[in-house]
Amino acid sequence: MALQEEFKTQGDFLFKNRSYLPLIILVIGLLVFIYQKHYNTVATGNWLPEFYYYICLGISLFGLYIRVVTVGYTPKNTSGRNTKEGQIAEELNTTGIYSIVRHPLYLGNFFMWLGVAMLTENTWFVIAFILFYAFYYERIMYAEESFLRQKFGNTYLDWAKNTPAFMPSFKYYQKAKYPFSIKKALKKEKNGLAAVFLLFWAFNFIGEMIKLQAIRFEYDFWFYGALVSSIIYIVLKIMKKQKLLDEINR
């Protein structure tokens, strides 16, 4: 198989499973965190400042913000979790955030996961994560762009010529074609909000458990963040099931 076809085959597989495969990295990161936390507690003490976790949270929430802005301005069947169906694009997004970067959702994902990766407090793991992310999403982006190029032809090529794939550039920014849909943003990104706070609470809980060598629940910022975001998720899930978040063509 030629390298071009091999990249596309790998990309199609990773695209269909992109919601699940990163969980393997999450498990590895959690194991690294447990080791790192135990080593720091036993050998060196906790050398990181107290606000380090908030820096990590800010990075993850910044990634979520990018996703919310992306999804909220797009029409139906152009951006989202099309896992079962594979590639879907009834329209080519070229305005708004798509006029400054071709893959804003993956850029958002990067920052969301980078914040979590930084929780491990291990520089080498963060570097490994960045390299893995580049390898992983390079193939997904290749497969996605092959599909878009085949479907939209020169329209896609003209847009791609002036729009970088991953590093944003505001040189050719255009106002979004559609108005922002808060309903679509809530419907699509409720998972991300809950996941971020649940993961940060889990890391903090495990870290404190290792530090104190005992299981103890603390009603702190992380606990309430996980609780509130989980309640929001459940409420939005019910609203979605009742079709209260549906909009025409969104």
Image: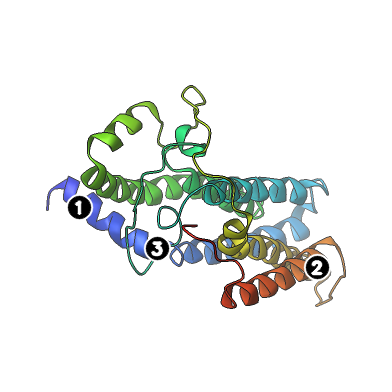
100 lies left or right of 55: left
Amino acid type of the residue tagged 1 in the rendering? Glu
Closer to the camera, 141 or 10? Answer: 141
- Image position, residue 53 (x, y; %): 75, 51
- What distance separates the C-alpha of mark 1 from that of mark 2? 45 Å
Q: Quadrant of residue 11?
A: bottom left
Residue at the top extreme of this rendering: 171
Amino acid type of the residue tagged 2 in the rendering? Phe
| Circle 3 crowding by C-alpha within 10 Å: few under 14, some 14–19, many from 20 | some
52 lies left or right of 152: right
Q: Quadrant of residue 245?
A: bottom right
Tell me which numbered mark, 3 or 1, is placed earlier along the sequence: 1
Tag 1 residue: 6
Tag 3 residue: 82
161 lies left or right of 112: left
Q: Is residue 205 above or below residue 80?
A: below
- What distance separates the C-alpha of mark 2 from that of mark 3? 32 Å
- Image position, residue 193 (x, y; %): 66, 60
Closer to the camera, 189 or 134? Answer: 189
- Image position, residue 9 (x, y; %): 23, 57
Q: Quadrant of residue 244?
A: bottom right
- What distance separates the C-alpha of mark 3 from that of mark 1? 21 Å
Which residue corresponds to the image point at 62% horizontal and 74% vertical from the top-left?
237
As helix, strand or loop, the secondary structure at mark 1 comes to: helix
Tell me which numbered mark, 2 or 3, is placed earlier along the sequence: 3
Tag 2 residue: 223
